Amino acid sequence: MTYYRNEMRLIRMEIRLGPAGNCLLSKGEKTLDSLKNLVKMGLKAQEIEFVRGTYMGNYEAKKVGELAKKLDIKLSVHSSYYINLASKEPIKIEQSKKRILDSAERMHHMGGGPVVFHPSYFSGQDKEHVYNMTKEAVLDMMKTIKKNKWKCQLASETTGKHSAFGSLDETIRLVNETGCSICVDFAHLYARRQGIIDYAEILDKLKPLMPRLNHHLHIHFSNIEFTDKGERKHLLLSNRPPFEPLAKEILDRKLDVTIISESPATWEDAQKMRKIFERLGHRF
């Protein structure tokens, strides 16, 4: 970890890499084993995947958080895929909020960190209407988090399909108007832009948010297959989009980041990312 002075204050710069989901090397292993496996691989982050359900209770979440702290592994969680905060059916909005808040409660017991979620879908509705519904739901959830004194941050993720709310500009607006956090998925942005990515442009747009984000950026990265509708499926690390130019931008800008691999081989590709950073001269 290094520090640099910016506007009369010290800013931390640290790069943490890790997988989405458990790194399980043997049959029967669970999340606690995953954390120990990551240490052996030189990885220092993990996103706990609640995408198909919140599979652990608060007691287990606390144990996971205690071990992660001991091993110096930064945790985040990814909430359910079954979320639509702008559904035409009010009950589905309430169910969506409950799933996100269930993840937030577990994140609190793990010691705090980002709670990543895909916000909503347009479903033929006016985009401004969908934005306002999403904003209202996020503000309502943030009130619950504050009331319960949970140590976590809702992190709206940039999404990969044009049918979903979550372009970079939409997500930045949501952060500015609610105070929530952000998860920047570069593969999703690449798919939205039909194979075009400008890391400098994206990071320039994010720069004004950094004080609000405590100068830390939570990132998802993988390669991706897409159609004219956007994201189709995540792929192994290669060059669609290329990772090395992003790594260079992160180092040049002295950014404090956590990068979660969402490829089909999460921890193997996280290790490949580490080697790219090392080749560029970074020491972990």
Image (tube, helix red, strand yellow):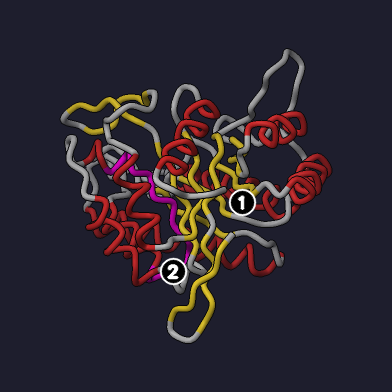
For mark 2, what is the residue?
A: 178
The structure residue drawn at horizontal position 46% and vertical position 57%, both measured from the top left corner, is 217
Q: Could you classify mark 1 by the number of other residues whose Cα lies within 10 Å: few (under 14), some (14-19), or many (20 or more)? A: some
Q: Earlier in the sequence, mark 1 or mark 2?
A: 1
Q: Amino acid at mark 1?
A: Leu
For mark 1, what is the residue?
A: 101
Q: Amino acid at mark 2?
A: Thr
Q: CA distance from mark 1 to mark 2?
A: 16 Å
The structure residue drawn at horizontal position 64% and vertical position 49%, both measured from the top left corner, is 74
| Residue 227 belongs to the span the image colors magenta | no
- Quick one: 233 or 91, which is closer to the camera? 233
Judged from the image, the secondary structure of the residue bearing numbered disc 1 is helix
Judged from the image, the secondary structure of the residue bearing numbered disc 2 is helix
Drawn side of residue 269 relative to residue 241, left or right: right
| Residue 181 belongs to the span the image colors magenta | yes
- Quick one: 237 or 153, which is closer to the camera? 237
